Amino acid sequence: MQLSADIARKLMEALSSPRSGLVDPKLMRLLFQHDAAQQRLVVRWGMWAAVLSYMAYGVFDWILFPDIAGQLVFARCAIGISFLAVVEFGIRRGASLAAMHLVAAAAIVTGAVGWLLLALVTAHQQALSHFIVFGIVFVLGANLFFNFRFILSAISSTIIASVFVAATLLVLEIEFTSRLVIAALFINCLVFSLYLSWRLGVERYWTFLEALQAKSQAHAATKKGDELHRIANTDPLTGLRNRRAITNAFSELYETCAGQEDEIGVVLIDVDHFKKFNDRLGHQAGDDCLIRVAQTLEETAEANGSIVGRYGGEEFLVLSRISGPDELRSLAEEFCRVVENLEIYHPDRGDGVDIVTISAGASQASANGGGELQDVLQEADRALYISKFTGRSRVTIYDPQIIDADHSGESLAGLLAHAIERQCISVVYQPIIQLGTEEIIGYETLMRLKGNNGRLVKPDIFIPVAEQNGAIVELGAWVFEQACADVARYKLDGVIAVNISAVQLKAPGFALRVAEMLARHGLAPAQFALELSERGDILGQSQAAQTVEQLRKLGVQIWLDDFGTGYAGIDCLRRFELDIVKIDRSFLPDGRHPRDVRMLTGMIQLLRSLGRTVLVEGVETVEQKRLLEELGVDLAQGYLIGRPQPVSEFIGDQKSEVA
């Protein structure tokens, strides 16, 4: 029970004062208010009991006062029923306890005095002198039966006693000594019952004060316990759950999901380049940044029925019930997006981005699995590591075939730095065909990287890291050199397409280096194509754009890769004379959904209207190949056409077919 400051002060003052002291009016009002509803019911059922008893005493009227019995019984019934009606009306209308007490007191006084005034005219005065002492019941009832306030008890009981004493001394026709005894009895009863009423009132008052203090202390203790629990489970900076609370939340979520098909998604979030943010702007700015990030993460988590907490430092952890990896990825990407939308300025990232972003690693736990957060958190942490080393501001879902393929005691960046000398890098070729004739018109050169454990690291994992740390310049040059050597050695026909990044194009003398390698191997520039990714910021770099023009003049073909996935595709079509444009595999539908087919058709029509040759990659089914033929696409590549393989293997296959 929470008390106002004024009531709490008065309570302390009252408890520290002697019990014989005056009661505080505010506390007394509070006493009658705190259980007013219950006391109103006491008045109601007390009145029913009193009225029924009052009317039952009419039996004595018939026996003792036959001359006026009818009047007395009628008066009893009229008074009793009238006051019962008033009480019931008050109960139904929600009358206050004070009003109900006034009605009850009036009923006692009226019932006592009304009966007495009628009974005094009886001829049976001796019988009345014996029966009049039952008037003491009314005095006791006014003082003890209904828990009236003392002043109301005193007034009502004094009126009753005074009327009965006056009637006894002045009207009752019996001996004076008998009248004096009856009057003394009433006076003694009045004094005794008033004292009892006062003592009971005082005891109720002090019992209420002590109970009020106990409830207040219990409330304070509960509130303090709740506050200590909140502090123990809350991160003091952001107000989110702390590590302990989020661990408990996982256990509760696991128990809730037990036996169900849903899984528990765990998303580990890290603020990108946060140390640089702190070092440049100061710890206060760092704290403010974490608070803003935490707030938007919490809002997003609540909107998605998820739980978020601060796991430590600049790391946050999200728990959510999910139906599968697609939902988990969508959720994690939404968290990345809302933090980017905050547009918190970051002055020193070192990667060309000037706002605060987050990287996320996610994993999922089955509700029927081991139920340990630490296990699934380790998976999410390894996925987060990949997100951070592949360019940051992205999401990685834990996949053991990808995650386990890398480091073995050495970082991916370190592996890339020594990939050439340790012969961890190799080249494979994927055929490109002319649709309709099925003729192979060339090959795309693809880079492969083996980790220290001998397993392949996927290109979408290591390429961004190589671009970020600059290793792509030497790796890309090695791939082009190897492609030139293979063409010269195996007399490969057709165009050899080599992927090139914006980082390579910005490197000084890149076009001269390409020309030198072609001349050294005695190869015609037109046999080679350099694929520019739409995802790269080529137009935003003047050196890169210049290099593209130099390569074009050298005679090397220029292809645009990943068309439709970035922001520079249309500008590249306008800026450069492109030989071939490759539509990204994501636009090739698995089925023939009208919307997907319309989008692909629109892209093909746009490119054809600009006079560009169209190549669609990612062809994996006969149905997809048939669709491209119907749409009049020029070229195609994909697993259905041919998988990437080392040059020695597909040259061997060609020789076998000839033989």
Image (tube, rainbow, N blue to C red):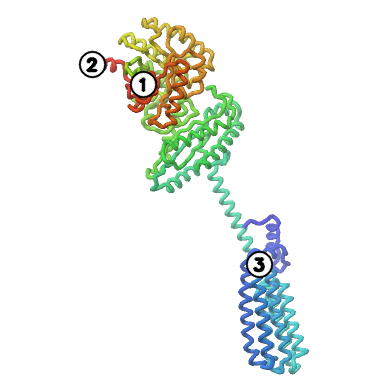
Work out whether mark 1 precedes mark 3 in sequence or the reverse, and give the earlier one. Answer: 3
Q: Quadrant of residue 625?
A: top left
Q: How many callouts does the rendering have? A: 3
Label 3 belongs to which residue? Answer: 93
Judged from the image, the secondary structure of the residue bearing numbered disc 3 is loop
Q: Position of residue 435 (x, y in %)?
A: 35, 19
Label 2 belongs to which residue? Answer: 656
Query: How far apart in space, not on screen, are marks 1 and 2 (Cα)?
Result: 22 Å
Label 1 belongs to which residue? Answer: 637
| Pick the front one: 528 or 105 | 528
Residue 378 vs 89, above or below: the answer is above
Which amino acid type corresponds to the residue marked 2 in the rendered image? Ser
Mark 2 packing: few (<14 Cα in 10 Å), some, or many (20+)? few
Which amino acid type corresponds to the residue marked 1 in the rendered image? Gln
Q: Position of residue 238 (x, y in %)?
A: 57, 39
Residue 436 vs 227, above or below: the answer is above
